[in-house]
Image (tube, rainbow, N blue to C red):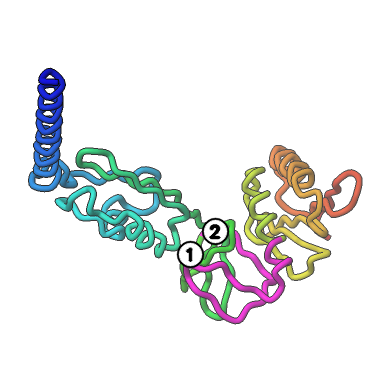
Amino acid sequence: MKKFMLEEKVHRSNKKLFSLILLLIGIVAFIVIFKTDVFTIKNVEVIGNKQISENAIISKSAITIGNHILKEKLENAKINLYKDPYIKTVEIERKFPNKIVIHITERKEEALIQFMNEYLIIDEDGMVLRSSSQMENLKVIKGLAFSNFMAGSILKVKDKSQFKQALEIVRGLNRHKVMIQELDISNKKDIKIKITNDLICKIGKGNDLDYRLEALNEILKDLSKRQITRGVVDISHEGYPTYRPVE
């Protein structure tokens, strides 16, 4: 009986000691984490930016050097960054003990759409990135009807299928590295591409797009080798593409 009581007493003593050690560890951890500068943010790294400067991204995020890394609200920082039309995706991570890393994907300027006396600059998803009073060195999309726009939003046009088709052609041109001046989608059954002022391509309804644009790319290479800069390339019909000089 005495032996059992002694063992019980030792067990309680060990339990108290263990609890005391846990308490001391907790206190030390609390002091290190919250009462020292070990976990204060000393560096913010930005990955993936090409158009927007690192300083601009850090400023837009509102992440502050010197703040505690655990107290920084990363979701709020993401919301702040998504307000910039040029930022497509954002991921933010904590790198302990004192670093924040911001991963972004940017939107790329792809085309111009004229609106009154301005030009709207959009990406390949139809997002309005900004407006400009100047015609910049981008492909122009003609034939879309709309009444207003908002930077940072997808352009709302009257004919959504027409706009979707135009964007598919823009993406196809990018895939096949075909440089153009203008895409005229006024007539969805007779879509035209202006390669230069003197060289036009007819792509019809724009179906079988990859096949047709691949054929166009090869034709343009051949015309360039032969120093032909004027004419009409027709890839709108079934069968072999055709070329004819300007009449």
Q: Residue flagged by tag 1: what amino acid is it?
A: Leu
Magenta stretch bounds: 137-164
At x 77%, y 54%, the residue is: 231
- The part of the image, by quadrant, that contains residue 246 is bottom right
Circle 2/circle 1 CB separation < 8 Å:
yes
- Residue 123 tag number: 2
Viewer-closest of 132 and 44: 44
Q: Determine crowd level at label 1: few under 14, some 14-19, many 20+ residues with C-alpha closer than 10 A.
A: many
Whether residue 158 is in magenta: the answer is yes
**Image spot of residue 72 (x, y percent):** 25, 54
At x 8%, y 47%, the residue is: 35
SS assignment at label 1: strand
Whether residue 69 is in magenta: the answer is no
- Residue 77 tag number: none
- Image height of 165 relative to 54, above or below: below
Q: In this view, does 173 lie to the left or right of 34?
A: right
Task: Find the distance from the CA under tag 2 to the CA under tag 1.
Answer: 7 Å
At x 54%, y 76%, the residue is: 149
- Residue 129 tag number: 1
In the image as oriented, which residue stretches furthest toward the right?
Answer: 239
Q: Residue flagged by tag 2: what amino acid is it?
A: Asp
At x 25%, y 55%, the residue is: 63
In the image as oriented, which residue stretches furthest toward the front?
Answer: 1
- The part of the image, by quadrant, that contains residue 195 is bottom right
SS assignment at label 2: loop
